[in-house]
C-alpha cells in the first residue's frame, strides 16, 4: 500500500508554466494620436513646402470651387485655396494654443505655489478669489477683456485666453505644494536663504508638474477651441489673418451656397487635432494615476 502511494505521487504530472508575454512599449499609449498630431504639426511648420497656391490670393474666377486636381480641397467664397490655407492657418491656430497655454500655466504655477506656502488667512483669500474667478464663464471673460484691449491680434488673443484659463491648474498646484511644503529639502533650502522662485523652479515644480501635465495639454485644446469660437462669432482675428477659426467663420455663406468643403475640411483638421491632444492628455493622466497608486 505504501509503495502504491509513493508510485502515484511519483507519477503526478507537473504543471507547465506558460511565461507571460512581455508587454510592448507602445501598448496603452496613444501612438496613433501622437502620429496624427505630429503629422499635422509638421505639415503646418513646413507649410511653404506643401502649399500649392498662395493662401492669401483671391482667385475670383474660381470662388466656391469644389475639390479637384488643381484645388485639392476646393476654394472658399473669396477664391482662396483651402489646401494651402489649412497648412498655413493651422500654424497660427497651434501657435495661439501654445502661447495661451504657456501664459495660463505660468500664472497657475506662480499663484498656486504662492497660495500653497502662504499663511492660512492669505491662502484662504487667494482661493476664494480663484473660486470667484472660476465661477465666471470663460468665454464671457475673454470677450470682455478682448473688447477692452481693442482689435484682436495673435498676441492679444493668446494673452486674453491665457489669463482666463489658469484657475483649475492653480488649485491643483496649491494642493500639491501644501503636501510637500514641509519636506526636509524645502526647509533646508529656506534655511540656506533660497527665495520663493528658486524653491519653486528647483524643488516644487519637478514634484507636481506630472500631476498637472494632463491639464496643461487640455489647455492647448481649450485655447484652440476658444480662438475658433471667437472667430466663428466674428469677434476674433480679422478674416485676412488665416486660421482654422477664421476659415470656419465663413460657414454661414458656405451653407447658403452649398459649399460643404469650406466647413467640413477645416472642421475635420480642428477636431482631429483636438481629439489627438485629448487622447494624449488622458494618457498623461492615467500614467500619473498609475504612479501615484504604486506608492
Image: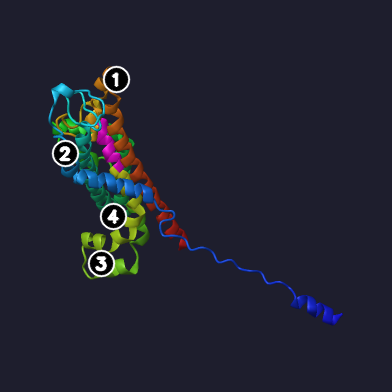
Whole-percent x, y for residue 62 in the image: 17, 24
Residue 155 visible in the current orientation? yes
> For residue 207, what is the image quadrant?
bottom left
Which residue: 37% across, 51% down? Answer: 31
Earlier in the chain: of badge 4 and badge 1, it is 4
**Distance Cα–Cα, label 4 vs label 1:** 52 Å
Q: Which mark is residue 154?
A: 2
Residue wearing tag 3: 190
Outermost residue to the front: 69
At mark 1, the secondary structure is loop
Image height of 229 relative to 206, above or below: above
Confirm or deny contact between disc 2 and disc 1 (CB under 8 A). no
Q: Residues within 10 Å of mark 3 (few under 14, many from 20)?
A: some
Which residue: 31% across, 69% down? Answer: 185
In this figure, what is the number of numbered marks? 4
**Distance Cα–Cα, label 4 vs label 2:** 29 Å
Viewer-nearest of labels 4 and 1?
A: 1
At mark 3, the secondary structure is helix
Confirm or deny contact between disc 4 and disc 2 (CB under 8 A). no
Does 177 lie within the magenta span? Answer: no
Viewer-nearest of labels 3 and 2?
A: 2
**Distance Cα–Cα, label 2 vs label 1:** 31 Å
Residue wearing tag 1: 258
Quadrant in the picture for the C terminus: bottom left
Q: Which residues are magenta?
A: 221-230
Whole-percent x, y for residue 50 in the image: 19, 42
At mark 2, the secondary structure is helix
Confirm or deny contact between disc 4 and disc 1 (CB under 8 A). no
Amino acid at each position: 500500500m505504501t509503495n502504491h502511494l509513493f508510485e502515484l505521487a511519483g507519477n503526478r504530472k507537473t504543471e507547465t508554466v506558460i511565461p507571460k508575454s512581455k508587454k510592448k512599449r507602445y501598448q496603452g499609449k496613444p501612438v496613433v494620436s501622437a502620429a496624427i498630431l505630429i503629422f499635422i504639426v509638421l505639415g503646418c511648420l513646413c507649410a511653404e513646402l506643401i502649399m500649392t497656391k498662395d493662401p492669401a490670393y483671391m482667385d475670383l474666377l474660381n470662388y466656391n470651387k469644389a475639390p479637384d486636381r488643381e484645388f485639392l480641397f476646393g476654394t472658399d467664397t473669396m477664391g482662396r485655396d483651402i489646401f494651402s490655407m489649412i497648412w498655413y492657418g493651422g500654424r497660427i491656430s497651434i501657435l495661439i494654443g501654445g502661447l495661451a497655454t504657456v501664459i495660463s500655466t505660468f500664472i497657475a504655477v506662480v499663484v498656486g505655489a504662492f497660495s500653497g506656502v502662504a499663511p492660512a488667512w492669505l491662502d484662504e483669500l487667494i482661493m476664494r478669489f480663484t473660486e470667484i474667478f472660476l465661477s465666471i464663464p470663460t468665454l464671457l471673460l475673454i470677450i470682455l477683456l478682448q473688447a477692452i484691449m481693442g482689435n484682436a491680434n495673435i498676441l492679444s488673443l493668446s494673452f486674453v485666453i491665457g489669463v482666463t484659463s489658469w484657475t483649475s491648474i492653480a488649485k491643483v498646484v496649491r494642493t500639491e505644494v501644501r503636501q510637500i511644503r514641509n519636506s526636509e529639502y524645502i526647509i533646508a533650502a529656506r534655511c540656506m536663504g533660497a527665495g520663493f522662485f528658486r524653491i519653486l523652479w528647483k524643488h516644487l515644480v519637478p514634484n507636481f508638474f506630472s500631476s498637472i501635465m494632463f491639464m496643461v495639454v487640455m489647455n492647448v485644446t481649450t485655447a484652440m477651441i476658444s480662438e475658433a469660437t471667437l472667430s466663428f462669432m466674428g469677434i476674433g482675428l480679422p478674416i485676412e489673418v488665416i486660421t482654422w477659426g477664421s476659415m470656419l467663420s465663413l460657414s454661414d455663406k458656405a451653407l447658403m451656397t452649398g459649399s460643404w468643403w469650406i466647413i467640413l475640411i477645416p472642421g475635420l483638421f480642428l477636431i482631429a487635432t483636438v481629439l489627438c491632444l485629448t487622447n494624449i492628455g488622458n494618457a498623461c493622466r492615467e500614467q500619473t494615476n498609475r504612479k501615484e497608486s504604486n506608492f
